[in-house]
Amino acid sequence: MFINNGDIKPFEKKLWLSSPTMHGSEIKYVQEAYETNWMSTVGKNIDEVERLAAAYIGRKYAVGLSCGTAALHMAMKLAGERLYGQPQIGHGALEGHRVFCSDMTFDATVNPVAYEGGIPVFIDTEYDTWNMNPKALEKAFEIYPEVKLIVVAHLYGTPGKIDEIKAIADKHSALIIEDAAESLGATYKGIQTGMFGDYSCISFNGNKIITGSAGGCLLTDSLEDANKVRKWSTQARENAPWYQHEELGFNYRMSNVIAGVIRGQYEYLDEHIAQKKAIYERYKEGFKDLPVKMNPFEKSKAVPNFWLSCLIIDKDAMCKQVRSETEAVYIPERGKSCPTEILEAISSINAEGRPIWKPMHMQPIYRMNPFITRDGSGRAKTNAYIAGEATDVGMDIFSRGLCLPSDNKMTKNQQDVIIEKIYLCFS
C-alpha cells in the first residue's frame, strides 16, 4: 500500500492532535456580546448555550461554567452535600469520604474529589472500552461497602459499560457523577452521554469536539440543584441590596463572550462527529496489515463521538520500552515498535501525537491512594512497570497505546502520510 523508502517530508504547517475548528458563524455571537456590552458572566449567549446543551443531551437543566473542571467541582459539592450534609467552612463536602473514580482519565476528573476533601479510590480499566471495569467496581464495594459516590469518565469519546455500572451503583445506593467532557455527542443505546449521571459534566475546552476556547456545563434534572450551582458559581451571593454571603462561593460562571463561540459551534457538532468518525475509519483500514488495534467500543450498544483516534500495539509486536516519570527510551527491533518510537516518528514530520492518559494510580500525587483491580488486588508494582512489565489493565494500555493526530481539518493525504510513517516504524 505504501512506499517504504523513509523519505517522508515534514508537513509545512503543524498537524495537531485536535485543534479548534472555526466556521465563521461564531463571530456573530461574539460581536453581539460586544455590541450589546454583555461582556461579563451574564447575557443571551450563556442562556442559549445552557438551552442548547440541555436540549441536545436531553437533560432538564444545564449551568454554564468557566470550564469542565469547574462543572466537576460543583458536581462533587452537590453530591457531597446531598450525601453528607453541608460542611463547615474550611471543610469540603466530601471530607474524609472515599469516592470510586475512573483510573484511566485526565486528572481533572479526579482532582475535584480532592478539592472537596474526598479520598479518590481508583478502579482499574477494562479492555473492551478502555473505561472503568464494572467487575473491579463491584470488587471495590466488597472492600469499601460504605462508599456512596462513583465518578465515571468516558475515555476519548467512547461510552463505558453504563448499564453494568448503573446497576452496581443502584445496588449499593450510590450516586454517579458522569464526566462526559470528552464524549459530547456520543450515545449509549441511543441515549446521549451526559444523561446517565445523577450529575453530569461536559467541556468546551480548546481541543474538544466543539469549543469556546474554554467553558463547560453541569447537567442535572433538578432545578434546585441547578440554582444552587448558579449561586455557588457567582460567589454564593445572597439576595440582598449589598454583597451578603452565607456560603462559600466560587468565581466559576461562564463568560458571555466565550458562550458566543460555543453557541456558534453547536451548529456544527454533528458535522464534527462525522469528520472524526471518518478519520477513525481511515486509520482502521490503513492499519489492517499492522499488529495494532484501534481504541475499542461496544458496537452493539455504543456510538462514540470518535474525539481521538488511538491505537494499541499487540503485545508480541512491542519492542523494549522503558519510561521514567518524565522520559522514555526504547530499543528498535525489526518488525516491532512501541508508542515512544511511533510518537517520535510522528513528531519528526511536524505532527502531534500523545501517549494514552497515564492512569491515576501511577501518578505521583495519587500513588498512595487505594487502587482496585477486577480480582481485588491493589497497587501495581512500580518496579515491574519500570522493567517493562504491566501488572494491571490501565498500566498495560498506557504501555502499549497512543493517541494519533485526529484533527478534523486533516486531509486524507495528510492522514495517509501519518499511516505510512507508522508502517515504517514496524519495517
Image (spheres, rainbow, N blue to C red):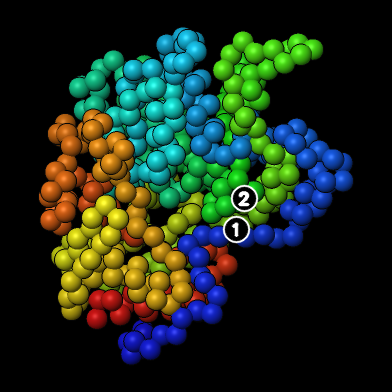
What residue is rendered at 31% in x and 38% in y?
Answer: 365
- Is residue 170 visible in the rendered image? The answer is no
Q: Amino acid at mark 2?
A: Ser
Which label is found at residue 320? Answer: none
Q: Amino acid at mark 1?
A: Pro
Q: Looking at the image, which is closer to me, 127 or 247? A: 247
What residue is rendered at 61% in x and 10% in y?
Answer: 246
Vertical arrangement, residue 371 with respect to residue 6, above or below? above
Query: Mark 1 and mark 2 in contact (Cβ < 8 Å)?
Result: yes
**The C terminus appears in which quarter of the rendering?**
bottom left
What residue is rendered at 54% in x and 54% in y?
Answer: 207
- 246 sits left or right of 423 in the view: right
Which label is found at residue 213? Answer: 2
Outermost residue on the right side: it is 35
Count of marks, rendered view: 2
Q: Give residue 168's quadrant in the image.
A: top left
**The N terminus appears in which quarter of the rendering?**
bottom left
Q: Which residue is mark 1?
A: 20
The location of residue 401, given as percent across then percent down, is 30, 58
Going from N to C along the chain, the mark reached first, 2 or 1, is 1
Vertical arrangement, residue 133 with respect to residue 173, above or below? below
Vertical arrangement, residue 81 with respect to residue 140, above or below? above
Q: CA distance from mark 2 to mark 1?
A: 8 Å
The location of residue 318, given as percent across then percent down, is 19, 66
